[in-house]
Image (cartoon, rainbow, N blue to C red):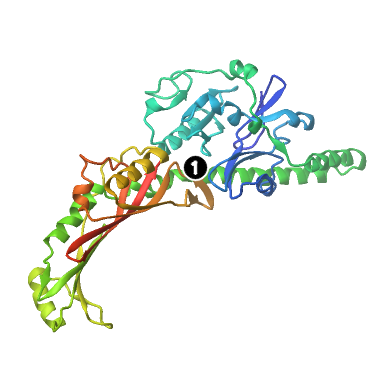
Amino acid sequence: MTENDNDNPLYVIRSGGWVFIAGLQWELVESRYRYAARAFARRHDADSFATVPANKNQLLAGIGNLHDAGVMPRETRKSASLALTLLPMLGNHGWGVFELDDGQFWFVAALNGQLSVLSDVVGNKHSIRDAVKTFLSFDLMPQDARTIICPPDFLPDVTADNVLLDNALPSITVPRRARLHPLSNRKALIVWSAILIGVFGGYYAITEYQSLQEAKRIADVRAAFLKTKEQIKTATPAALQPWKEQPVLATFLSTCSAQWKSAPISIAGWRFRTADCTSGSMRLAWSKPIGGTVGDFSRRLAIWYPGNKPLFNIPGGADTGGVALLLAMPLPATPEIVGDADSQTQRLTNYAQQLRAVLNLTEDSASTVKVNNESIPLPWRSFSFTFATDIPPDKLFSPALFDASGIRLTRITVTLNNARLHYSLEGKLYAQ
């Protein structure tokens, strides 16, 4: 087992005729085709890469420079990502820490069956502990739902099986997707040609200087990537767990319904028309009757809502009067665990069908967060929805009738039409 000299080097393990590489750089590539991953690897001065499908129209690409890690050209034909090789050991959801030589450790993790870009990290005990903690800050699954592999006493309060790589690798089958693909041998040829020129032509000093400059540049690029990964710890809670920063459905409904229920059906003859409620405000509107005036409405509104300014569609027809009320909704103290996408979407869809409500549900495309221009995939999916019904939603979505885990409202619109109230709910559904 060998390692190269970068700040966070690739770690090379030779076993069973294979060369396994730990510590690859992983990032999402906006394409379904391997050529995009190849171009990404070239831009980062790598000589090998591996890819696996990620989100729709995306690949997860792992890249590294095997030549700089001491891998001979003939060995690259049987080289593989250690992370993708051992990922099946973690099941659909889990993480593992494996002991290497010279006091080093290696960390790998899976989220929903896919390799986490926050894993495949090589380092000492302290740095690997930090890497595990960073991963767990994204992972919302309870500990007993994960597969965990870890040396004894590596982390407090963690009991797990310990797996030795020397025992696991000889019997393992290397998956096809774990194989590393070479870019070209141009860099290796340049290096060897430079050495020969130096030996026979007396230009060794110049070649050595250029090699050192190139190695320094690659090391700087790698260090910048690691710094960016570390900065994911500073990502806002709204990015990591957006439902924690939004009021739960029951709070949203009770706050809004208390306002529209207390609104008068008529103010100076102006008939109630609509109520529009968000987490920060409620806007109520009334329609002008024949012969009604904005002056009459303003005077009567001051009795119902003292201290609040009347609102009119002026310029315009001046036939709608209203008022805007400030609202305050508390946030959840502890965010709930959300289910997978199938169970979440099917639960809401089934409930809408039972009630014969009109539901529109679409998946949002944003699934990453930018930290210093690096795309980090987030461990959740979100869906936008509208839910139209004639049933009062505060009764419809009571906790006794419906499990609203992972569902947040952004707006409720109440409309009076033909002496009946109609309700339109807009919001987000979150899933693992």
Residue occupying the point 31% across, 47% down: 352
Residue at the image point whose x is 70% and y is 42% from the top: 215
Q: Quadrant of residue 177?
A: top right
Q: Residues within 10 Å of mark 1 (few under 14, many from 20)?
A: some
Residue 254 drawn at (x, y percent): 18, 51
Q: Position of residue 270 (x, y in %)?
A: 14, 75
Residue 197 higher or lower than 302, as above or below? above
Can you see residue 283?
Answer: no
| Amino acid type of the residue that numbered disc 1 sits on in the rendered structure | Glu
Front in this rendered view, residue 68 or 158: 158
Quadrant holding the C terminus:
top left
Image quadrant containing the N terminus:
top right
* Residue 304 locus on image (x, y percent): 9, 69
* Secondary structure under the numbered disc 1 in the rendered image: helix
| Rendered view: 27 above or below 325 | above
Task: Count how many numbered circles sit on residues in the image.
Answer: 1
Which x, y percent locates residue 42?
70, 47
Q: Is 135 left or right of 80, judged from the image as shown?
A: left
Q: Residue at x 38, y 25 (%)?
A: 144
Does the image show residue 389?
yes
Q: Quadrant of residue 106?
A: top right
Residue at the left extreme, as displayed: 303
Quadrant in the rendering for residue 411: bottom left
Query: Foreground residue, 169 or 401?
Result: 401
Nearer to me, 331 or 226: 331
In the displayed structure, 77 sits above or below 302; it is above
Q: Which residue is mark 1?
A: 230
Check the image and report above or below for 20 versus 186. above
Name which residue lies at 37% across and 23% down: 157
